[in-house]
Image (cartoon, grey):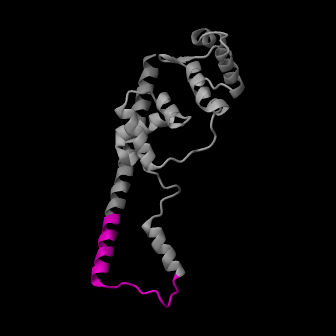
């Protein structure tokens, strides 16, 4: 989809509002694409009437909406027969595709898809434990030598050894398959050369 500048949008919207032509005429005159049954120009006109100049500008700010608001918007969309554009204008939002994303996410994964997501890298339990061990002094550090803990560590070690052996065998088999495939390709190439 083409990106149009604010100045261009405002010029065309003003032509429409000053009755210098209809939607179809002005869209064709300025090479504005239509999106389904509503032209892009109609969306610009509606956004301009609702928000003024801000309705024609691409928003660079990332508004943060609460989980409750998102659920409310999705329920409104699903329970009424309004378009994303009309719903966005009604709610004072200038981003109808965001509503479409919320609705699609809701349909795919349910309400949890609309919950805010934590930013940044997930902390692993192991790395937190390592940090705690580094911070604590050697005198205070006690090693758990109970039979149950030792058994748990031995089981974990055995599992890791088995997994490591499995991955090594898988790699060996893959390398063998690749070598066989290379041999077949070379013999196929050699037979083609001898037949020519």
Say which of 59 and 77 sits in front.
77
| Left or right of residue 124: residue 16 | right
Say which of 133 and 76 sits in front.
76
Estimate the x, y position of residue 195 in percent, counting from the top left.
Answer: 42, 17
> Can residue 180 be seen here?
no
Location of residue 193 with respect to 116 vertically, above or below: above
User: Which residues lie in the magenta part?
Assistant: 136-161
Q: How many marks can you see? A: 0
Estimate the x, y position of residue 115 in percent, counting from the top left.
Answer: 42, 50
Location of residue 176 with respect to 156 vertically, above or below: above
> Can residue 163 be seen here?
yes
Magenta-drawn stretch contains 157 = yes
Magenta-drawn stretch contains 182 = no
Q: Residue at x 59, y 19 (%)?
A: 41
Q: In which quarter of the image is residue 161?
A: bottom left
Say which of 130 and 180 sits in front.
130
| Left or right of residue 40: residue 115 | left
Q: Residue at x 41, y 42 (%)?
A: 72
| Left or right of residue 174: residue 33 | right
Estimate the x, y position of residue 40 in percent, counting from the top left.
Answer: 57, 20
Q: Residue at x 34, y 85 (%)?
A: 145
| Left or right of residue 170: residue 42 | right
Estimate the x, y position of residue 54 in percent, counting from the top left.
Answer: 65, 34
For the N terminus, the quadrant is top right
Location of residue 159 with respect to 10 vertically, above or below: below
């Amino acid at each position: 989809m083409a990106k149009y500048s604010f100045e261009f949008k405002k010029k065309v919207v003003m032509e429409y509002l000053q009755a210098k032509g209809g939607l179809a005429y002005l869209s064709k005159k300025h090479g504005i694409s239509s999106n389904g049954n509503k032209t892009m120009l109609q969306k610009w006109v509606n956004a301009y009437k609702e928000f003024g100049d801000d309705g024609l500008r691409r928003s660079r700010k990332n508004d943060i909406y609460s989980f409750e608001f998102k659920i409310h918007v999705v329920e409104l969309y699903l329970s009424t027969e309004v378009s994303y554009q009309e719903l966005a204008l009604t709610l004072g939002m200038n981003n109808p595709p965001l509503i479409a994303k919320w609705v699609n996410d809701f349909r795919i994964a349910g309400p949890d898809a609309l919950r805010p997501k934590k930013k940044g890298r997930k902390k692993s339990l192991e790395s937190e434990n390592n940090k705690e061990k580094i911070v604590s002094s050697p005198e205070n550090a006690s090693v758990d030598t109970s039979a149950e803990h030792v058994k748990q560590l031995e089981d974990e070690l055995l599992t890791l050894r088995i997994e490591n052996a499995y991955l090594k065998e898988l790699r060996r088999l893959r390398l063998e398959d690749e070598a066989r495939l290379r041999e077949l390709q070379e013999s196929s190439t050699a037979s083609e050369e001898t037949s020519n």
